[in-house]
Amino acid sequence: MAVGLGSVFLNPAGLATALILIPFLLLYLIKPKPRHETVPSLLFVMKDLGKSNISSFFRSFLRDLLLLLIGAAAKPFINVSQRYLAEQTVLVVDVSASMHADNDGRFKQAISLAKENIGKENTIILIDSSPSVLAERVSGSAAKDALDALRPTDTTTDISDALQLARSYATTGSRVIVISDFLPTAGDKDYKTVADALESTGAIVDYLPVTGGSSNVGIIDLAVGPVTSSVWLKNTDPRPAQVTLKISDAAQQVLLGPGETKEITFNTPPGVAKLQIAEGDDLLADNTAWTSAPDKNTVKALVITNSQDAVQRSNLLLALNVIGKNFPMTFDITYAQPPKIPSLDGYDVYIIDQTNLDLMLPGYIRDIKDKVSSGAALIVFAQPALFSMDWQGLLPVTPQQDVAGSRSSVLPATVSSLTQDVDFGQVSAYTRVQSVAGATLVAKTAQDPIIVLGAIGKGHVLYYGIDDTQGSFSRDPSYPVFWRRAFDLLTNRPSLENLNLHTGMVLTLPSAIPVKTPIGTVTANIIPLDYAGLYTLPDRTIAVNLLSDGESQIASPGNVTAAASSLDSGTAAEGPLDLSDYVLWLAIAFLLLEILYLKYRGDL
């Protein structure tokens, strides 16, 4: 009997509350036998005044109420799928670039499925190159509003990290709904281990795949060089494709075999240029790319020297000629011989090399300092008696007591964009200096700074302590590379690497400034690059591209089965749904109807 009741009631013992009826039964059994007396019928009617009806109603009312309370105490239930019992739902929604497939059809499917699975309390996690929490423990209506405001990004897909993030919100009995095309292109692409760990929390996990669109020819890579650049096109279809590639105003036909990747080389356009596959397909997100190169190609330099012939024959000038021939950067060089120095207006860089410092008047140094403070640059080469003159705080170094240094190797102080892959070689002698507070150490010997970068106002000062006539650096192939990078830095000319970025990266700025992005203007100092296109700053334009072979493979079947055993919804576990509250509400409704019925019948 207990087994039978257990299949209907969560608390069969609650039926024991029926024992409260025993006192009423005993009172009924021991009540005295009624006496028969003769009374006038009219008096009986007058005294009753309907009281017998009211008394009968309340006896019936109390009996019904007690029976319903006894039933509710026993907690009747029915078995339903556990997913309908969850108090908390974690929605993991893919918003990566491949969700643009089929004219955003995949993304629309994902949003529709997410809305169908909204629960009482909802957390929404987004799958892209860096998974994030869109909404945390919000109501169903708030979750729907958050989903309505979503749009797919142009980033790669990191399913593993998204599942790991979902695990931190999953608890026993909660629901986790993962909605994606299951094409991981970032992070750990074999996410089965993380999926198993997610299910070990006791959560009910469902993986809902979305599909749509399969035909695609896309731009999967781009290398922007100072003179020439290359773009790679890939046909992901099992049949040949011919497309039109437009680069700025030029166009060319490209024939691609099934699954073929082809490299196209072109001259790097100055400024900003657009590359586009003219024909449409099922994924437009990878049909467009951008390049950005510096607009300013001429550096105006004033060389202050009393040995013009020697400077013109120096390795520095040879390096500048190499840079001009191999990079879109030219140098307009003017020479000045102290004490006669022309106007300092209009120059980007001032170079002091092999100069008779006795002829450098204090006014010249003051004027140069003003120009540097306004954004120009100064390069000072080490020479005898350099510190015999008052530099008025311009130099980023001060002399050591022992001014002479012996033979030593020169090494980068830190590996940076300025020193990466640069071999500074050795010096046989050098002037010992120490850097001032706030200066940046670029290169050093075993014990001393030898190349130091300082800042004055908006400009920079570079101290170059290597004697190129005695060191090996000027004969190394990396010598012109270093100087090209140095001039880029000193003239605030952004490098190609910093002008051409990938989606999923983060743009960090010194301060919050307005930046025009592909989805609108934002004012911030940290800007996630989630959308491909142009990011326009006050002093430069940055090209941001998707460039992902994996995201272009929209025809590939997603590896949903790598996730877990809970994919088979037919075998989902069941649990008891407590009907006590429903019984109580039903009881209240029943009693109200009974009162209305009795009132209608005239028994009240």
Image (cartoon, rainbow, N blue to C red):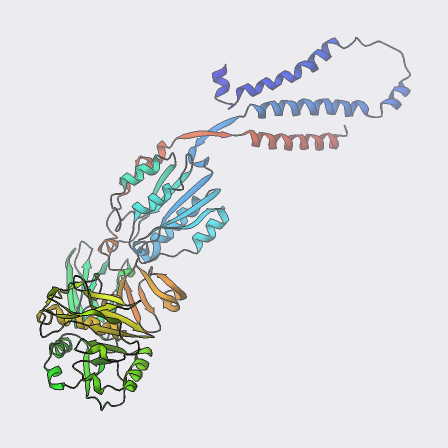
x, y (%) of residue 227? 16, 73
Q: Answer with left or right where residue 108 lies relative to residue 441.
A: right
Q: Quick one: 555 or 441, which is closer to the camera?
A: 441
Q: Quick one: 419 or 290, which is closer to the camera?
A: 419
Q: Answer with left or right where residue 403 lies relative to residue 18.
A: left
Q: Residue placed at 33% from the left, 43% from the top?
A: 164
Looking at the rendered structure, the number of numbered marks drawn on it comes to 0
Residue 283 visible in the current orientation: yes
Q: Residue placed at 58% from the left, 17% from the top?
A: 16
Q: Quick one: 85 or 479, which is closer to the camera?
A: 479
The image quadrant that residue 348 belongs to is bottom left
Q: Residue placed at 68% from the left, 33% from the top?
A: 592
Q: Answer with left or right where residue 106 lies relative to residue 421.
A: right
Q: Residue placed at 31% from the left, 35% from the top?
A: 565
Q: Quick one: 296 or 317, which is closer to the camera?
A: 317
Q: Answer with left or right where residue 39 lies relative to residue 151.
A: right
x, y (%) of residue 93? 37, 49
Residue 289 visible in the current orientation: no
Q: Is residue 568 above or below residue 423?
A: above
x, y (%) of residue 421? 15, 63
The image quadrant that residue 411 belongs to is bottom left
x, y (%) of residue 573? 39, 31
